[in-house]
Image (tube, rainbow, N blue to C red):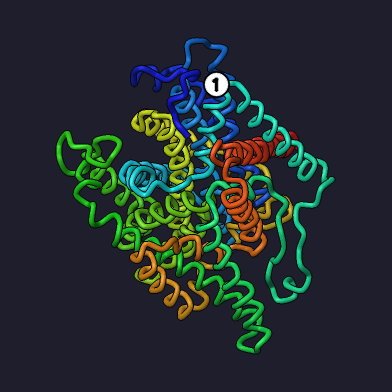
Amino acid sequence: MSSQNTKVKYADSFKEQLTARGLIIGSIGAIILTMSSMFVALKLSSLPWPIMFVALVSMFALKPCGNTNINEINVTHTAMSAGAMVAGGLAFTLPGIWMLDKNADINPLTLIIITVGGVILGLIFTALIRKYFVVTKKLSYPMGQAAAETLIIGDAGGKKAVTLFASMGLGAIFTVLRDGFGRIPATFMNSKMIEYGSYGGIWLSPMLISVGYIIGPVFIGIWFFGAVVGDLGILIGGQYFGLWDADIASSVKASLGIGLMVGTGIGIIINGILPKAKEIFGSMFKKGRVGDSIVTLRWAPFVIVLIAFLFTVFVHMGVTASVITILGVWLATAMSAQCVGQSGINPMEIFGIIVLIAVKAVSSIGQTEAFFVAAAVAVACGLVGDVMNDFKAGYILNTDPKAQWIAEFVGGVIGALVSVAVLLIIINAYGPEVFGTEVFPAAQASAVAAMVGGISHMPAFVIGLVLAVILYCLNLPVMTLGLGVYLPFYLSATAFVGGMLRLLADRVFPEFERKGTGSIIASGLLGGEAVVGVILALIVAAQILVK
């Protein structure tokens, strides 16, 4: 897809991209989305990607103001979406504190330091790795691609716009019938697979099928192969042939998947980032040098030291735990960027668990402080997953990444402060005992609480880690393999359907995809479910506030 559509208006200067009105609109949107995302993440234990919703809202908000352009819209929705994923990082980890100790008393300043610290670290590392993943590796980032496609076609109009918005309408109607009225089942599950502890089946999701279509059959095929290994091999095959019981099978599956993802992160650093260290990190140590970074980051080392000091003294994590946490964010943000780029999924709480376990292995950190580690990492990874999608859209649209990064900074900090405020309001209104109940199940935080004790099956974890490092250095997409092993089978199977549809289109109907029709329809279906998901989230949040 070309960003130079003659019917679309592009910015002529940096000032036309990063505007005061854009930041105001983006900030207001960030506040609203952060509030709703915090409620929904705790209530439904999930978060829809906000990028499609905010792209459309930004376009419809700026168009009436006059004299706008597609790059200003892009920068505005970058600011607007940041807070949602920051809220997710907090909601998916910290409630575990009160699940284990109902009487835990946490200083609000501590929560602010952890959350803002995670945002700042995420921004620093994102500025450093953006070029590697978006420009050099050219990862798919399907959500970012879909957002760019929507803005270009929506702004240009014509037959492609009709196709896009018609498919978006179909995706929206389907999602309303499924999630709003319950007229369509969300999943079809296989009872035989469930008997072995596998979530085998299909999720009726236009969005995930579209993600599979956009990513294509290669990455999706490896993702699904991981699911086959994890569920059909370890869970079902292992129990069927008497190799282990259900509990051990589940531990092996989860530990192997986590090991593969950690190994991928290490492989990224060894094979991708360290060989380019001078270009990537030059902006942190040489005056006026940007290199691969978006902005000059000579201030970054001082800020990192300050964050380590705050974590050590005010959060009581200790020097060792603070340093390992910051290094862990470096590793985890690289893993998050790779994972989102290849799959459209960002298991931020898993990255938090990984670093948490590493910290506990080398320090005597307390139980509560362990959750702080996971929260800082998850917040950083949530922000990175969001901004890398935005950067992909910006790369397609020729938006200045510096303008986007500044907008992400504004939205991310707003998201950090608002998400902490909402969490404290919930605790004061409902009591800390509400977490883990039907009111706020907070399933991801429960998983973090369960993993505070460490990796459940260390041999499987080590095997996965070593294997992933080797495979990544051989340029194989092993992150999606680990994701397939770890995630529920029905998610992988649904994405696999989209990948196979893309394979069919490429082989049997090449003209269909050559004209971009398939990608336009996929973007529309993806956008329809994503937009309705955010709207339904806003409705849920409003209902909770009213009660």
Please give the name of the residue rendered at 50% of the width and 18% of the height, measured from the top-left corner: 7
Give the residue type that dot 1 points to: Ala
- Image coordinates for residue 538, horizontal then vertical, percent: 67, 35
- Image coordinates for residue 518, horizontal then vertical, percent: 61, 41
Q: Nearer the viewer, residue 390 or 412?
A: 390
Quarter of the picture containing the C terminus is: top right
Please give the name of the residue rendered at 46% of the width and 74% of the height, measured from the top-left corner: 461
Q: Nearer the viewer, residue 144 or 503?
A: 503
Q: Specify few, some or many for label 1: CA neighbours under 10 Å numbering under 14, 14-19, or 20 or more.
A: some
Q: Is residue 432 visible?
A: no
Residue denoted by label 1: 156
Left or right of 466: which side holds 24?
A: right
- Image coordinates for residue 162, horizontal then vertical, percent: 66, 26
In this rendering, the answer to whether 122 lies above or below 543 is below
Outermost residue, left side = 287
Outermost residue, top side = 66
Q: How many marks?
A: 1
Q: Nearer the viewer, residue 117 or 29?
A: 29
Please give the name of the residue rendered at 62% of the width and 41% of the height, measured from the top-left corner: 522
Q: Secondary structure at mark 1?
A: helix
Outermost residue, bottom side = 242
